[in-house]
């Protein structure tokens, strides 16, 4: 699991990261809202934790921009404020949960685990980007026409469509899509490249307006084919 922490209070940030890292959770840290926005745009996360009051750009504005891209990664907002209006504003901006400072680290961890479980269980079965639709229930990719996908093709295409415009590394793709089957005999770089190649062929076959860019062993990105 990978979490983005956006918090300008260094001691708080270090404490949160230490707890999460101890639980085996990888963390990226942003010290202001603009840095958080850039990290969210370039990386893929299971959950994001944003303080509302941050320099350069506040957490609410950063969240609004992230949601405008179609990024539905679960977000927990942190604030020292207690007014109901502030909580409502955060939820209206697209936050999934809210914690008021000071909070217990165990509570933050519990909420992260709850949101990531919920996100895994309730991802929409039909995703759309450009003229392309993916139905994960029947494993079908559609645009000008339709084509059926294998199980891992569906999981990989879902990851791309949930993270449009983001550079996803080969290692990150392998860890998420093949997380339940990975073993020492499997060559992650090779299997990811093979399945990316499969998807490229099928996107062409349905006359999709999407393309997967990237080279073997590097990062891949799903973008509109303009």
Image (spheres, rainbow, N blue to C red):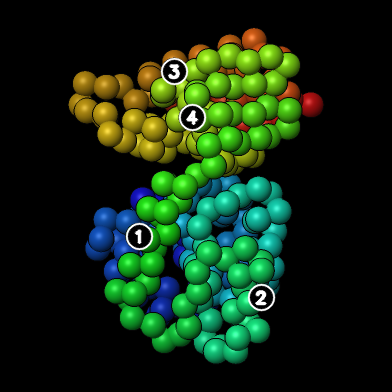
Q: Which residue is mark 2?
A: 89
Q: Which of the two discs, 4 and 3, sits closer to the camera? A: 4
Quick one: label 4 or label 3, which is nearer the N terminus?
4
CA distance separating discs 1 and 3 = 29 Å
Q: Which of the two discs, 2 and 4, sits closer to the camera? A: 4
Residue drawn at x 50%, y 30% as measured from the top left: 136
| 46 lies above or below 171 | below
Of 86 and 211, the residue lying toward us = 86
**Badge 2, how many Cα within 10 Å: few under 14, some, many 20+?**
few
Residue 147 falls left or right of residue 113:
right
CA distance separating discs 2 and 4 = 34 Å
| 197 lies above or below 168 | above
Q: Are marks 2 and 3 in contact (CB under 8 Å)?
A: no
Residue drawn at x 65%, y 55% as measured from the top left: 67
CA distance separating discs 2 and 1 = 24 Å
CA distance separating discs 4 and 3 = 12 Å
What numbered label is drawn on residue 113?
1
Quick one: label 1 or label 4, which is nearer the N terminus?
1
Residue drawn at x 28%, y 34% as measured from the top left: 180
Quick one: label 2 or label 4, which is nearer the N terminus?
2
- Where is residue 186? Give x, y as percent: 27, 22
Is residue 162 in sight in this rendering? Answer: yes
Residue 7 falls left or right of residue 33:
left
CA distance separating discs 2 and 3 = 42 Å
- Where is residue 71? Give x, y as percent: 61, 49
Image quadrant in which the C terminus is located:
top right
The mark total stands at: 4
Q: Which residue is mark 4?
A: 137
**Badge 1, how many Cα within 10 Å: few under 14, some, many 20+?**
some
What numbered label is drawn on residue 150?
3
């Amino acid at each position: 699991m990978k979490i983005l922490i956006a918090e300008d209070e260094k001691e708080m940030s270090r404490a949160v990261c230490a707890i999460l890292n101890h639980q085996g959770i990888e963390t990226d840290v942003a010290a202001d809202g603009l840095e958080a926005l850039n990290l969210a745009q370039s990386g893929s996360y299971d959950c994001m934790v944003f303080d509302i009051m941050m320099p350069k750009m506040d957490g609410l504005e950063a969240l609004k921009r992230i949601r405008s891209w179609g990024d539905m990664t679960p977000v927990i907002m942190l604030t020292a404020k207690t007014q109901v209006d502030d909580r409502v504003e955060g939820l209206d901006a697209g936050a999934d949960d809210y914690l008021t400072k000071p909070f217990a680290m165990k509570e933050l961890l519990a909420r992260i685990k709850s949101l990531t479980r919920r996100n895994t269980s309730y991802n929409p079965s039909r995703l759309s980007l450009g003229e392309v639709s993916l139905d994960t229930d029947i494993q079908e990719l559609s645009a000008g026409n339709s084509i059926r996908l294998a199980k891992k093709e569906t999981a990989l295409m879902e990851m791309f469509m949930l993270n449009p415009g983001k550079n996803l590394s080969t290692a990150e793709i392998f860890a998420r899509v093949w997380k339940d089957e990975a073993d020492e005999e499997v060559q992650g770089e090779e299997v990811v490249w093979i399945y990316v190649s499969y998807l490229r062929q099928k996107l062409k076959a349905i006359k999709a307006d999407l393309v997967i860019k990237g080279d073997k062993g590097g990062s891949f990105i799903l973008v509109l084919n303009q």
